[in-house]
Amino acid sequence: MKFAAGIIGFCVLAACGLTACNPDTANTAREQVRKQALDNVPLGAEAAKRNPSPTLREMLNYALQDEYLARAKYRMILEKYEQQKIFSNSWRTENKVIQALLPLFKKYGIPVPKDNARYSVRLPGSLKQAYALGVQGELDNIAMYERFLKTNVPSDVKKVFSEIRDASKEHLAAFRRGLAQTVGNGK
């Protein structure tokens, strides 16, 4: 992380020409560098797939990252496609899920990862693609929690993971219905 922060700092200075520069230019350069850095780093369920034996700390980090990603994705979709009830409900649920995970970080003395998800999500090209992404995201999320639940995690963590997995199953069914409707409507 220190190395990445150093690169970001260097690139921001380089973008400003190593002289005093407009703070807006520095902020824009910093955002671009962060975005580029995060594009190649797997987060959430994708990162969890690559770790055969995650620790409790890693599981909680993957879980929170995955929920951050889902919330950012649903927000972006809502901004583009507006009153899509399924995405609106899912976005609200993601906020609740994040709030359910945070006390576990405190209890187990684990630093809460920053929410940089907005740098890692892309707007789907159509409502049909949005529903398809919702389906895949929930499938990945469910698989991640199922895997975590097979490990020896504390009972309070197991309870939260189970509740999140169950909510994801409900979202999956809703996204599948939405996808079927967009296919039927040709959207």
Image (tube, grey):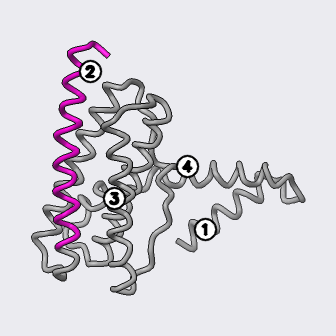
Of marks 2 and 4, which one's residue comes earlier in the chain? 4
Rendered location of residue 168, percent (x, y): 21, 51
Instruction: Using the image as rendered, state which of residue 64 and residue 41 is in the foreground.
Output: 64
What amino acid does circle 3 point to? Gly
Of marks 2 and 3, which one's residue comes earlier in the chain? 3
**Residue that label 3 marks:** 44
Residues at marks 2 and 3, CA–CA distance in whole angstroms? 28 Å
Q: Secondary structure at mark 4?
A: helix
What amino acid does circle 4 point to? Gln
Residues at marks 4 and 1, CA–CA distance in whole angstroms? 13 Å
**Residue that label 2 marks:** 182
**As drawn, 129 above or below 44:** above
> Which residue is drawn at the image coordinates 52% and 71% (left, top)?
1
What amino acid does circle 2 point to? Thr
**Residue that label 1 marks:** 5
Depth check, mark 1 against mark 2: the one in front is 2
Residues at marks 3 and 4, CA–CA distance in whole angstroms? 18 Å
Q: Look at the image and give the residue range highlighted in magenta.
A: 159-187
10 Å crowding of disc 1: few (<14), some (14-19), many (20+) = few
Asked if labels 3 and 2 touch by Cβ distance under 8 angstroms, the answer is no
Find out whether residue 25 is within the magenta segment: no
